Amino acid sequence: MQIIYDKLSCSFTRLPDTHFLLDIETTGLLKTRDCIICIGVIYKKSQSIVSSIQWFAEDKQDEVAILKCFLEFCSAYQKVYTYNGQGFDIPFILSRLDYHALSTASFKALLFVDMRKTLSKLGSKRLSLEKLLGYERETSITGKEFVALYKLFEKTKLITYHTLLLNHHLEELGSLLALYEYYYTIHQIVSYKSIEVIKNTAALQITLQAPFSFHTTCSMQFEDVNLHWHANTDLIGLSIRLYDGIFKKYLVPAKDYYLIKEQNQLVHKSVAQFIAKDLKQKVSQKECFVSKVGTFIRLYQPIKAHPDKWTNDTESLFIEYQDDPSFATLILKQVMYLLTSKQK
């Protein structure tokens, strides 16, 4: 077994002391038959740097040794982040621990977070996500090629194969850190300092300042939101589409409203009771609305406490644009919900 320390160094240090990132390499996809040949973690080494550890099996018999080292590492942590960990890494590790009759307690005690559930909103392929985040790999080894290289390494012990294997896995860890930076940023976006809010004819432009510098460059468009930041800066740019036109607000319940025919106006029953029957008529729910011309922003998460929710012809929810700081905060909450909620 080999242990490779500190091969990945990065200035992005928002990873809490009790959290780490996890990625494994295996000889195949069958957890009851195949083996784990490399376990890699990213952790906070100090206040100023995050780094990596790789436990590498020089042959399949080293699987027990790397699992034991990994379990010892886990005992000092509370939460682990993965990409597709719930579908692969976590059940694979648990299966191999059971196979070798090793205790699963310290591993099961962790809170598992699979970032794929959030990141799948941007794309189902990891390589496409890396492109959005400006992460570039120097090697391009597939899973099958990795397994083939490992078999060659077992037979020959050539340093060339060893280097290729470890470098590929190190790039997987680098990718994982880039994905975590995006995941962390969008979950914290409401707390960042607002530097500038500009409204133009097409969009609301918000510039935020994060309490750290990015190590990736992000550029993505999802529904009505454009999000970007650049490596070695602490500024986040958001552009949220504005809608101009006629919007409806439905009055509920419809049975409490009447249409005054001559004025073509809806009134509540508390007022309608004083109006003659032949001058008023009941309305259906589809007819029970008021209209307004203005500038609106789409709602992605219904706000129960907000009384003025409007709709367009597609029945999507909107709120009217307001020029005040509290409105910008509300919109940031909507952006966070849009980018972090599970894909339907």
Image (cartoon, rainbow, N blue to C red):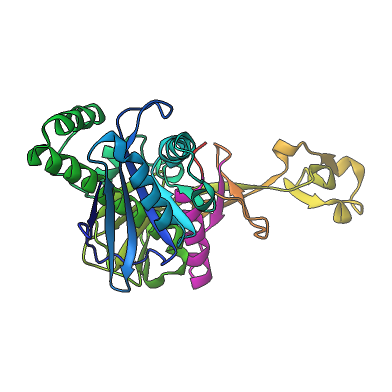
Q: How many marks?
A: 0
What's the residue at 67%, 58% (across, down)? 307
What is the magenta range? Answer: 316-341
Depth check: 164 or 125 in front? 164
Q: Residue 235: which quarter of the image?
A: bottom left
Give the vertical position of 274 relative to 172 (above or below): below
What's the residue at 28%, 38% (across, down)? 128
Q: Is the stretch drawn in magenta largely helix, strand or loop?
A: helix
- List x then y, in percent, for residue 1: 25, 46
Q: Is residue 174 visible?
A: yes
- List x then y, in percent, for residue 219: 27, 51
148 relative to 34 in the view: left or right: left
149 relative to 296 in the view: left or right: left
Q: Is residue 202 visible?
A: no
What's the residue at 24%, 26% (across, down)? 144
Q: Is residue 333 magenta?
A: yes
- List x then y, in percent, for residue 266: 75, 48
Depth check: 322 or 261 in front? 322
Q: Is residue 314 magenta?
A: no
- List x then y, in percent, for residue 262: 76, 45
Depth check: 235 or 305 in front? 235
